[in-house]
Amino acid sequence: MDTTAEMEDGDVGAGFAPSLDAILSIPVTVQVVLGETAMPVNKLMKLQRGAVITLDQKVGAPVSVLVNGRVVARGEVVVVDEDNARYGVSLTEIVGAPKT
């Protein structure tokens, strides 16, 4: 008994082609980085409520938008809600893929 299915021209691999919907539904992690700093563990352990950590970014400098840990864009922080309850990022630059 032959169990091999016959395919017409144009059907080659049709059952195995990845669905674009499946690819577009893959979750990714998006982060907005306001700035960074480095400090020794002993200073980190002394932080208390209300402590201020100074970042390397200046006020008004663009923030970095990362997708799965890679910078993909830069932008400005904006207020989304009129009651100032939520913030967002207005993209000002899309970062291209690194040259290889």
Image: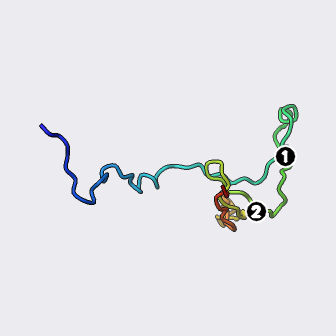
Left or right: 42, with 94 as reference point: right
Specify few, some or many for label 2: CA neighbours under 10 Å numbering under 14, 14-19, or 20 or more.
Answer: many
- Residue 62 is labelled as 2
For image coordinates 38% across by 54% down, the residue present is 19
Q: Name the foreground residue: 25 vs 50.
A: 25
Residue at horizontal 86 percent and vertical 34 percent from the top: 46
Instruction: Name the spot of residue 13 as percent of width and height, x first.
Output: 31, 51
Q: Specify the quadrant that holds the N terminus.
A: top left
Evaluate if marks 2 and 1 touch, with contact meaning CB atoms under 8 Å apart.
Answer: no
Q: Secondary structure at mark 1?
A: loop
Provide the residue designation for mark 1.
Answer: 53
Badge 1 amino acid: Ile
- Element at badge 2? loop
Residue 96 location, quadrant: bottom right
| 88 shown above or below 7 | below
**Image location of residue 91, percent across then percent down:** 66, 66
Label of residue 79 in the image: none
Q: Residue furthest left?
A: 1
Horizontal and vertical percent position of residue 65: 67, 56
Q: Quadrant of the C terminus?
A: bottom right
Q: Residue at x 84, y 37 (%)?
A: 47
- The answer to which image quadrant residue 60 occupies is bottom right
Determine whether, in the image, residue 38 is placed left or right of residue 31: right
x then y, percent, for residue 88: 66, 61
Q: Earlier in the sequence, mark 2 or mark 1?
A: 1
Front residue of this view, candidates 7 and 14? 7
Q: How many marks?
A: 2
How packed mark 1 is, by other alpha carbons closer than 10 Å (few <14, some 14-19, many 20 or more), is: few
Amino acid type assigned to the residue bearing label 2 in the image: Pro
Q: Left or right? Give the position of 92 relative to 41.
A: left
For marks 2 and 1, give the one nearer the viewer: 2
The CA span between labels 2 and 1 is: 19 Å
